[in-house]
């Protein structure tokens, strides 16, 4: 079994919450720069344009890389939207003051 999958299965919500709220963990450096949806779409379109323009004999390989990159960006955006929705639900159920305690 993949170590990441095993870690996620063993991780409790309490531990995940600690990791997400602990400001001392160097998460920001690992995340890279934050981009809006429009910036991400523009970047993917630019990569696609470059692949089409400079692909030559390797066009298929270059296009596959762009598609894989776009897929990962989409998964990340979906994950973040899910986290936001979950946080809103938790806040509505527990009240905003409970989250700050």
Image: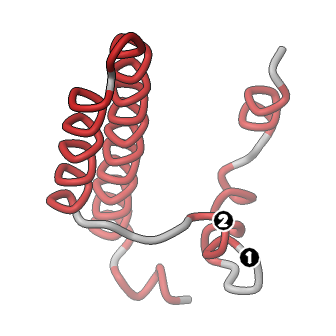
Q: What is the number of the mark on residue 56?
A: none
Give the residue drawn at x 77%, y 33%: 4
Crowding at dot 1, Cα within 10 Å, few <14 / some 14-19 / many 20+, comes out as few
Dividing the picture into quarters, in which one does residue 83 lie? bottom left
The x, y position of residue 15, in whole percent, is 75, 58
Q: CA distance from mark 2 to mark 1?
A: 7 Å
Dividing the picture into quarters, in which one does residue 1 lie? top right
The x, y position of residue 72, in whole percent, is 43, 35
Give the residue drawn at x 70%, y 69%: 18
Query: What is the image's colouring?
Result: secondary structure
Identify the residue under disc 2.
Answer: 30
Give the residue drawn at x 39%, y 18%: 64
Give the residue drawn at x 40%, y 44%: 79
Q: Are marks 2 and 1 in contact (CB under 8 Å)?
A: yes
Task: Name above or below for residue 15 compared with residue 53.
Answer: below
Identify the residue under disc 1.
Answer: 26
Tell which of 90 and 83 is nearer to you.
Answer: 83
Crowding at dot 2, Cα within 10 Å, few <14 / some 14-19 / many 20+, comes out as few
């Amino acid at each position: 079994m993949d170590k990441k999958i095993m870690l996620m299965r063993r991780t409790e919500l309490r531990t995940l919450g600690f990791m997400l709220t602990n400001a001392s963990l160097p998460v920001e450096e690992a995340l890279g720069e934050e981009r809006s949806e429009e910036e991400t779409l523009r970047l993917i379109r630019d990569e696609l344009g470059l692949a089409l323009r400079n692909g030559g004999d390797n066009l298929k390989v270059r296009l596959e890389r762009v598609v894989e990159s776009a897929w990962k960006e989409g998964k990340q955006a979906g994950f973040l939207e899910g986290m936001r929705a979950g946080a809103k639900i938790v806040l509505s159920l527990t009240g905003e003051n409970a989250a700050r305690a």
